[in-house]
């Protein structure tokens, strides 16, 4: 049984061409003219692109006394409805928990996934067991390790822990990831705001100014450089952080930045809305910023200093958000976006001329696949690649609304925004996964995708060489210190 996608224009990160695609056994078998297949999907008037990859989701995540409301069933259903054919979620051990035990728990969450998935592993505490287990985690195809520089007293790691973990990740050929906010300063500002009687959701934004993100991003970059590890900075929301990433990249460091569709679309005025629910539903970390920061993120995507667009999809219902009434620090942090990422990015990026269709594919899929070790299985339209494909109608429109979304929550932070550019048909490993408003892949169709580590990189740091070089020995035979 073969499937033929006919009459479309294939758009990849580096090429636009009119050609048909033949699919067999879940993979792309041929690309060309005059191909013949059993089942034919007509893509007239559409672009055919690699499926979106969301490198940053939190499905059924235990967080701030509750669980995020979308699980791997509703989350992957939302993903497919918006053209995303793979998500990378976070296995999140408690600070004293075994990484492998946490992985077992996250594996068990995925039984009903509608699309493929992978994991990053979070490092929330540092000890010998964690060091030892990291090798096994890499052997199981999880090659990226996330570190929280915020959430003091819960998930946060200190610099000594981060440095040790980064070195281990580097030695294993993995990628270090950071949530870059200065957790000590956030905790201090939060306590002060509460003491002054600022309990509402707008204080959440005041407690996490752009400087806490800029400082932490700079610090993580320097620590990664000393540790000899590539660094991926999640949810870059401001110029302060983007500037640090730009500078690092210019200096030849392997650092990547990931803005979210939320920060590219919404701004801090959302927190001034007099409706408590409206503002609290938009509480996430980092918070939304002003237009200057938004412009910086768009320019980063356009120039290549920022590499990927994600969602950090971590959805909470209004009831869950209301546990923070009277204390903004108890509002579960997080927003949704899985279903809306690609249509919004297309509308605001390609629709405005800020991104070409090829650049859209790069930041929504291909760059992510390359950085995360998935390419060319994912993120590509090549013979042999998984047939995770979008038949994208650039003329289709809709108004985003909670009433028609797949997500399990009762609102949508993008409510009322119009988009132009939507998936008409979505394929997951050759199976129709979304067509005419319905998800078609069965629950359990989604498979874990193992990733291979890369070569250890970033070893050119001259200071590091000096630190590790044999130390000169004094005449007494005692090694000199302090060199
Ligand atoms: N930020 C959020 O808003 N939610 C989940 C975790 C995070 O870092
Ligand atoms: Zn985060
Ligand atoms: Zn996150
Ligand atoms: Zn389902």
Image (spheres, rainbow, N blue to C red):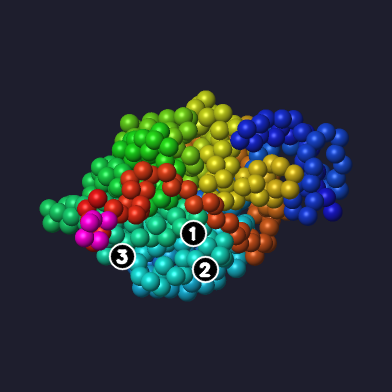
Q: Can residue 320 be seen by looking at this rendering? A: no
Gap in angstroms between the C-alphas marked 1 and 3: 26 Å
Image depth: mark 2 or mark 1 in front? 1
- The secondary structure type at the circle numbered 2 is helix
Residue 218: where, in percent of width, then height?
A: 31, 44
In this rendering, would 431 be left or right of 255? right
- The secondary structure type at the circle numbered 1 is loop
- Badges 3 and 2: C-beta atoms under 8 Å apart? no
Per the image, the residue denoted by label 2 is: 136
Q: Which mark is residue 154?
A: 3
Per the image, the residue denoted by label 1 is: 172
Q: Earlier in the sequence, mark 3 or mark 2?
A: 2
In the rendered image, which quarter contains the N terminus? bottom right
Tell me where the magenta segment starts and ends, as one range. Answer: 473-477
Q: Earlier in the sequence, mark 2 or mark 1?
A: 2
- Badges 1 and 3: C-beta atoms under 8 Å apart? no
Whether 307 is drawn above or below 470: the answer is above
Quadrant position of residue 122: bottom left
């Amino acid at each position: 049984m073969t499937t033929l996608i006919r009459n479309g224009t294939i758009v990849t990160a580096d090429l636009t061409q009119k050609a048909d695609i033949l699919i067999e056994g879940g993979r792309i078998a041929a690309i060309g003219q005059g191909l013949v297949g059993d089942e034919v999907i007509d893509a007239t008037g559409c672009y055919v692109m690699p499926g979106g990859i969301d490198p940053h989701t939190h499905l059924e995540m235990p967080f701030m006394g509750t669980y995020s409301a979308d699980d791997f069933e509703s989350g992957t259903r939302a993903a497919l409805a918006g053209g995303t054919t793979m998500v990378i979620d976070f296995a999140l051990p408690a600070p004293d928990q075994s990484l492998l035990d946490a992985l077992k728990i996250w594996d068990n969450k995925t039984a009903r996934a509608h699309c493929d998935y992978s994991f990053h592993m979070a490092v929330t505490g540092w000890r010998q067991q964690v060091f030892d287990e990291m090798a096994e985690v890499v052997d199981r195809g999880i090659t990226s390790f996330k570190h929280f520089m915020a959430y003091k007293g819960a998930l946060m790691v200190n610099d000594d822990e981060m440095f040790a973990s980064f070195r281990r990740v580097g030695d294993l050929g993995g990628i270090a990831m950071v949530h870059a906010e200065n957790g000590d300063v956030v905790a201090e500002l939060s306590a002060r705001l509460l003491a002054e009687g600022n309990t509402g959701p707008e204080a959440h934004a005041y407690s996490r100014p752009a400087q806490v993100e800029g400082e932490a991003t700079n610090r993580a970059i320097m620590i990664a450089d000393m540790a000899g590890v590539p660094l991926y900075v999640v949810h870059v929301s401001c110029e302060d952080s983007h500037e640090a990433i730009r500078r690092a990249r210019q200096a030849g460091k392997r650092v990547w930045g990931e803005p979210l569709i939320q920060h590219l679309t919404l701004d801090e005025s959302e927190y001034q809305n007099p409706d408590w629910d409206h503002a609290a539903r938009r509480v996430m970390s980092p918070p939304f910023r002003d237009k200057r920061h938004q412009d910086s993120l768009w320019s980063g995507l356009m120039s290549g200093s920022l590499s990927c667009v994600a969602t950090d999809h971590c959805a909470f219902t209004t009831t869950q958000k209301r546990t923070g009434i009277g204390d903004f620090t108890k509002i579960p942090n997080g927003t949704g976006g899985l279903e809306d990422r690609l249509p919004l990015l297309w509308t605001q990026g390609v629709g405005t001329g800020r991104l070409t269709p090829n650049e859209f594919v790069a930041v929504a899929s291909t760059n992510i696949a390359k950085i995360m070790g998935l390419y060319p299985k994912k993120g590509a339209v090549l013979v042999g690649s998984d047939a995770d494909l979008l038949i994208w109608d650039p003329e289709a429109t809709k108004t985003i609304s909670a009433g028609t979304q797949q997500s399990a929550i009762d609102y949508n932070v993008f409510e009322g925004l119009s988009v132009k550019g939507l998936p008409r048909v979505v394929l997951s490993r050759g199976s129709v996964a979304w067509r005419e408003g319905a998800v078609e892949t069965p629950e359990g169709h989604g498979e874990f995708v193992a990733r291979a580590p890369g070569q250890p990189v970033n070893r050119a740091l001259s200071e590091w060489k000096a630190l590790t070089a044999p130390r000169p020995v004094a005449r007494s035979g005692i090694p000199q210190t302090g060199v």
